[in-house]
Image (cartoon, rainbow, N blue to C red):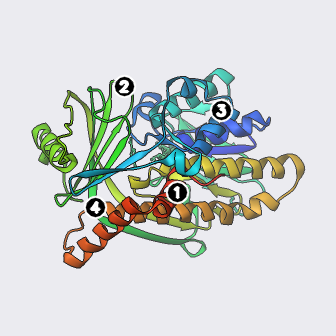
Amino acid sequence: MPVARTEVAIVGAGPAGLLLGRLLGNAGIETVVLELRDRDHVEHRQRAGILEQATMDVLEAAGVGARMVRERLLHDGVELRFGGAGHRVDLHGLTGRRVAIYAQTEVVKDLVAARLEAGVPLDFEVSDVAVSGLDTDAPTVTYTHDGERVELRCEVVAGCDGFHGACRQAIPEAAMTVVERDYPFAWLGILAQVAPSSPELIYANHEDGFALASMRSPEISRLYVQCDAADELEAWSEDRIWAALHTRLATDDGWTLREGPVLDSSITPMRSHVASPLRHGRLFLAGDAGHIVPPTGAKGLNLAVADVTVLAAALIDHLHHGDDAGIDAYSDRALDRVWRCEHFSWWMTAMLHRFPGADGFDRALQRSQLDYLAASEAARTSLAENYVGLPL
Ligand code: APR
Ligand code: PHB
């Protein structure tokens, strides 16, 4: 079996793995990125679309933000819509920070292009990845690539392989605690070839269910409706999707939603999930490999960026200076931000969705929370500072 060597083996070429590789490469640390799928798949998976200011700053500082700066749509606010009326949350006015619309697909494309341009290893379509020796100072990652089994010897393994990845499975159950919550609904998302119907995002609480009007560009809308957790796409014709969006986003002042050709559609399950610690010996978990948030708070991608920003600094101190304070503190430090985002995402989800079996008391609590946000600048400031993201 051919033996290869690197300093940090990174499993997963999503935002977490690719950005970690970039941050470490910028510090002169050798990495190999191993990815299960092919390039086209990872660059076109429809996922998130909101970048926090901290995320934008990290991408720019890492030298992979030029196209993002050119093409992003900067947003100063979001709208909460309920009871037939909209209520704007002035993110920038309340916090001095803003968010950007820049699709995760574009972030991944920028990171892949930068890695290939740097000429450093990025193996797509690997299979049968196995990690071992995590409790030694010479862990290995074995995998199959181009029909050949390879042993990659390294000093550190970064598990950036998402919720269904292999790395976390390599941690003994007794060494890890997992807490989770599955929500009794899902999101059906569409990409439509039509100009967005509003300049900013609209989050709608409606008796029929949640809806979100987002966007990808001045020409492309990104729209979501709450659906049953067990729903399949086949149960949702385009007519049914548009009808639900019109109903749930309607206002008393006659605002109208533009329709257009549907380019892509998918159903996303809703779950909260946190594994701890995010470290086992020489294995460090980052991004979805360690935690999942429901998309209501737009935190998944931003949490992945936050994790690897902390992890990269820690690994640089460890590998270049023999200082282990950062790697020893990584899990606790990352999880502090994870839990802030888990709570915010849960809170937004609880406030905006129609829960099966919810009674009049539940619905009154939701309405009271929404009315309080509409009436109180203090309440909107709390939402705003969580939405734009606390400083890294
Ligand atoms: N070996 C190699 N690669 C793997 C393996 C494996 N065994 N299992 C999964 N992968 C790859 C996946 O194909 C994917 O490309 O790991 C990558 C993980 O990327 P993401 O799932 O995007 O996770 P992450 O990089 O943490 O980014 C989090 O992505 O899923 C969204 O909502 C999430 O926006 C958030 C962001
Ligand atoms: C998106 O545009 O995909 C999006 C925006 C905000 C969210 C979730 C998804 O809360």
Q: Bin the neighbour count of mark 1 within 10 Å (Cα to Cα): few under 14, some 14-19, many 20 and up.
A: many
| Mark found first going from the N terminus, 1 or 2 | 2
Can residue 283 be seen here? The reply is: yes
- Evaluate if marks 3 and 1 touch, with contact meaning CB atoms under 8 Å apart: no
| Mark 3 vs mark 2: in front | 2
At label 1, which amino acid type do we have? Answer: Asn
Residue beneath the point at 71% across and 54% down: 139
Mark 2 lies on residue: 218
Determine the secondary structure under disc 3.
Answer: helix
- Residue 353 circle label: 4
Asked if 331 appears above or below 216 in the picture, the reply is below
Q: Cα distance, mark 3 to mark 1?
A: 22 Å
> Does dot 2 land on a helix, a strand or a loop?
loop
Amino acid on which disc 2 is placed: Pro
Q: Is residue 60 above or below residue 78?
A: above
SS class of the residue under badge 1?
helix
Q: Residues within 10 Å of mark 3 (few under 14, many from 20)?
A: some
Mark 3 vs ligand 1: CB below 8 Å: no
Look at mark 1 in the image and give the residue it sits on: 386
Q: Which residue is mark 3?
A: 60
